[in-house]
Image (tube, rainbow, N blue to C red):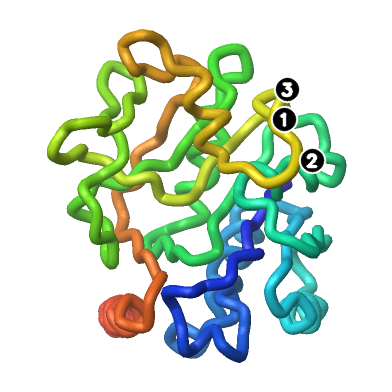
Amino acid sequence: RAMVLAAGRGERMRPLTDTMPKPLVPVAGKPLIDYTLDALADAGVMQVVVNTSYLAEQLQTHLQRRQRPSVTLSHEPERLETGGGIAKALPMLGDAPFFSFNSDIILRDAPSKALRSMAEAWQDDAMDVLMLLVPIDNAQGYEAKGDFFYEEGMLRRRGDADSAPYVFSGVQLMHPRLFIDAPEGAFSLNILYDRQRDNAGKIPNIKAVIYDGLWLHVGTPDQREQAESFLAVSRQAHQ
């Protein structure tokens, strides 16, 4: 199963998001959320929960047209952020590890293969979260300084360093036990990640798989145009 985070207002994508939710913004003629749902379906994910809030009726209408994967909506009258949104949807996600997927990113190269690699790498007794990390040089549309170091199987935040070599892709496998004793209401997933850090800043129960393809972050109109250019080049290369 999988959770797709689609409840955001998309302020940075305005004016496009003045009239549509960000997950429906088209990129190369295809709504952003369909890149995510197609990758999940191709990887064998059968059931997906999508959280909604802003202009939820439009998302509901669009998702009703899909046949695979099967989609269930988790509506949030007021946004619960990443952690709160998943916590609310947990009863629909079951007791086993599930994918969590941001809806404003595109894995351009073999996304279903990356997801299957994550499923194969999962070790239930050794991890609560398995992140898909992207080398910063492969992160198109990303404008920050990197998120993580990943050395000898241990994840560590960038912290005060000038830069870090890996970017969190917005894709991860997580176990429901991560949410034991989670806060009520709206909260960020970072709260759950950081409570596992040791004194050296390492996060032992969060591991990673490195994605070696191009990762497209689509958070602004300019990034949308860049993504369309990259996807056009990719299509030409495969013709």
Residue annotated with mark 1: 176
Report the side of 53 relative to 133 (left or right).
right
How far across and how far down the image is residue 120, in percent?
Answer: 54, 32
Q: Is residue 239 visible?
A: no
Report the side of 8 relative to 168 (left or right).
right
Q: Nearer the viewer, residue 52 or 127?
A: 52
- Say whether marks 1 and 2 touch (CB < 8 Å): yes
Residue at screen point 43% across, 86% down:
28
Residue annotated with mark 3: 181
Residue at screen point 24% across, 60% down:
143
Quarter of the image for residue 31 reads bottom right
SS class of the residue under badge 1? helix
In space, the residues marked 1 and 3 are separated at their CA atoms by: 11 Å
Q: Residue 6, relative to residue 100: is it above or below?
A: below
In space, the residues marked 2 and 3 are separated at their CA atoms by: 13 Å
Instruction: Determine crowd level at label 1: few under 14, some 14-19, many 20+ residues with C-alpha closer than 10 A.
Output: some
Instruction: Determine crowd level at label 2: few under 14, some 14-19, many 20+ residues with C-alpha closer than 10 A.
Output: some
How far across and how far down the image is residue 132, in percent?
Answer: 43, 42
SS class of the residue under badge 2? helix
- Say whether marks 2 and 3 touch (CB < 8 Å): no
In space, the residues marked 1 and 2 are separated at their CA atoms by: 7 Å
Of labels 2 and 3, earlier in sequence is 2
Residue annotated with mark 2: 90
Residue at screen point 56% across, 39% down:
189
How far across and how far down the image is residue 38, in percent?
Answer: 60, 67
Q: Is residue 201 visible?
A: yes
Residue at screen point 42% across, 74% down:
12
Mark 2 or 3: in front is: 3
Identity, as a three-letter code, of the amino acid under mark 2: Leu
Report the side of 140 relative to 205 (left or right).
left
